[in-house]
Amino acid sequence: MNVKALIRRVNHTLKLHKLFPEHSRILIACSGGPDSMALLHLLQDIAAHRHTKYKLGIAIVDHSIRPESKDEVLWLQNQVDALGLSFYTTTFDVPTLSKDLKLSEETVGRQVRYQWLNEIAHSEGYDYIAVAHHKDDQAESILAHLIRGTGLNGLTGMAVVSHDYDIPVIRPLLDVTKEELLAYLADRKLTYCIDSTNDDIRYQRNRIRHRIIPELESINPNVVDAIARLGCSVSEDLAVISNLTVQAFERLVTIDKNEMRLSRKALRKEPVAIQRRLWQRLMSSIDSDITLTTAHQEQLLDIVNTGEGKTFTIKSIKVTAQCDTIKVYCKH
């Protein structure tokens, strides 16, 4: 295991995205497992590599799913205290919340965890939240989207920098495999906890990890790298398509006080890929919570391709088409 090469690679990811400048304050989401313990120590190594200091804080959520989770929180607190770092913890009853909200434990756990991390980062003055997703997680995420059904957005996987919350969420390890992280921990003689639920194939991600990925690796041993490269390639292509969509919006859409107008004839000349994204942009500019389904998109394409009078309604938005003019407006 070449630890220096690993540190340089993670540092390269951070430099590429202009992340963690001198004296950054970074809140690390840590479960005590191998991935997040590796992230904690790698960030300390990178600070030394850059001849700077970071203010690191460690945050752990007890999801109340496993009886041993309380002991893991205490174990991690002892580790963090020994390093002289700030420590934050909270507890959520995720199984109960999951039943009440009729959502999976995975979904609820992710929602409450990120919301709490953002609140702590805000109140304690951290610049970034760092999470330990790595290349294998990226491959699993892309496969999960593919299995559920996705467009190009789902094939991009997770971004190194995410702005879903007020505080940016950073994934420094997306170019590092799980195997490399375990080798790093072994080389540094670092300890960590093992989450027994990671082997529970009732969870979709675990089925992908323990059954689907190994089967794919029997066909292509480098399938994780291949899927991660696909995600990068799709991201690059989407950036071009997004730029073309912005240009089409500026060229085709007329905005008045209470409505947006565009020409059926002009819209028909655009590639379908641009039309679909243009519709999503139109809807989001009125109501940011609206995400168009495939069925919605097909209805909107039908409005464009026919000369008949048509009306389409989704939540608070109404689309009407008469002759060549399409109008989009809030119906309230």
Image (spheres, helix red, strand yellow):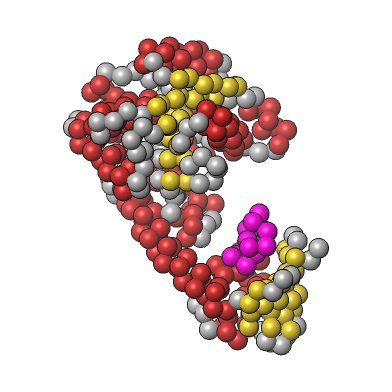
| Membership of 59 in magenta stretch | no
Residue 101 percent coordinates (x, y): 71, 36
Quadrant occupied by the N terminus = top left
Q: Is residue 301 above or below residue 68?
A: below
258 displayed left or right of 19 = right
Which residue is pictured at 27% across the width and 43% down the height?
12
Query: Closer to the camera, 266 or 140?
Result: 266
* Residue 183 makes an appearance in the image: no
Residue 121 percent coordinates (x, y): 52, 32
Quadrant occupied by the C terminus = bottom right
Residue 7 percent coordinates (x, y): 25, 34
* Residue 91 makes an appearance in the image: yes
Q: Is residue 87 above or below residue 159?
A: above
Farthest residue in the right direction? 332
Which residue is pictured at 40% across the width and 40% down the height?
171
Which residue is pictured at 64% across the width and 27% down the height?
95
Query: Closer to the camera, 330 or 96?
Result: 330
Which residue is pictured at 50% across the width and 17% down the height?
73
295 displayed left or right of 37 = right
Disc count in the image? Answer: 0
Residue 197 percent coordinates (x, y): 50, 27
208 displayed left or right of 285 = left
Q: Determine the image quadrant of residue 165.
A: top right
Q: Which residues are magenta?
A: 280-292
| Membership of 286 in magenta stretch | yes
242 displayed left or right of 54 = right
